[in-house]
Image (spheres, rainbow, N blue to C red):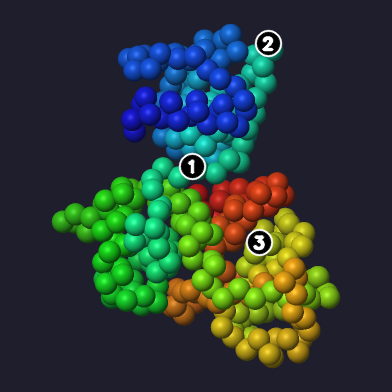
Amino acid sequence: MEPNKTLEQALAALEKTAGLAAEHEAGAPEPEVRLAGTVYRVRLSGELAPRNLEKVVTESAPEELLVAERVTPKAAEILRERGIHFLDQAGNAFLQGPELYVFVSGQGRPAKRSTGPQIRAFRPKGLQVVFALLCREGLIHASYREIAEYAQVALGTVTGVIQDLDSLGYIRVGRSGRHWIDRQGLAEDWAKGFQRELRPRLNPRRYRVEDPEWWQDLDPREYGFRLGGEAGAARLTGYLRPERATLYGQGDFKALARTIRPVKDEAGNLEVLDSFWGPQASEDWGPVVHPLLLYAELVNDPADRLQEVAARIREGFLD
């Protein structure tokens, strides 16, 4: 962790999400921050989740401002209940004073590294490899050939992606093998890359289905598909009332159509996309796509109701 960089990014994010500017002395050995007339002593931290909050809560002092790389939504709620002031690099924050109250939660992790087209890991085929690594526990330690089979890509693609992930600091490749360094950060950056690079290449088709709840009692695997999007998130969490559904796969759509009776409509409530993973990767998923894919679809939608469910998926299934 680079202390000054962490603090500067957190303060910049706070100004963006809450419109609150801070005063601080860059490079100070014991940094302090003035916010709305209150001076806080800065205490730096890595990612904070409920599992590692006990020591932070025990050692906190009223005059301290906890500045973290990321604070998960559940951790943010705990810190707020305990009256512990915090900021993170995504713009999440809790600050309370005589004339100040700020509470921001659920902001996704900002992209820390370039995910531009020159990076093989964030091109379409590279994103398939990253998705396989993130979804299948232990695949990071597998042979390149096995990874290629899971991801449905050429062997050379895996080689380039592993090199990128190592150079970008997501994983470490050494004599003892490959190990995760920043799996959560990679998941966040994959979600952004999926929307931009991979999703448009999945042959999207739109339809309208008259029955908005057609997906509730149907197992799409019987037709060679899996459920994604809002309907998939609703089925996974039981929390969302979906307005749209997404199906992934190259199954027998004609057979499915005889059941749900879709009509082509560019503004319809059903989107069908090709899948981009191998059969081994999805053998234990059930009727819904992997939570990482659901998260990527929802977190890239600006609707507040979907952002809230995306945060629930991240907290409950990805963190």
Q: Residue at x 70, y 86 (%)?
A: 256
Q: Residue under circle 2?
A: 98
State how far apart marks 1 and 2 are (Cα). Answer: 31 Å
Identified by mark 1, the residue type is Pro
State how far apart marks 2 and 3 are (Cα). Answer: 40 Å
State how far apart marks 1 and 3 are (Cα). Answer: 23 Å
Q: Residue 50 versus residue 24: which sits nearer the camera?
A: 24
Q: Residue 54 versus residue 183: which sits nearer the camera?
A: 183
Q: Position of residue 258 (x, y in %)?
A: 76, 89
Q: Residue at x 27, y 53 (%)?
A: 166
Q: Residue under circle 1?
A: 110
> Is residue 63 shown above or below 178?
above
Q: Residue 232 versus residue 8: which sits nearer the camera?
A: 8
Identified by mark 3, the residue type is Ala
Helix or strand or loop: what does disc 2 sit on? loop
Residue 284 seen in the figure = no
Q: Earlier in the sequence, mark 1 or mark 3?
A: 1
Q: Position of residue 34 (x, y in %)?
A: 52, 12
Q: Position of residue 180 (x, y in %)?
A: 33, 52
Q: Residue under circle 3?
A: 233
Q: Position of residue 7 (x, y in %)?
A: 43, 25
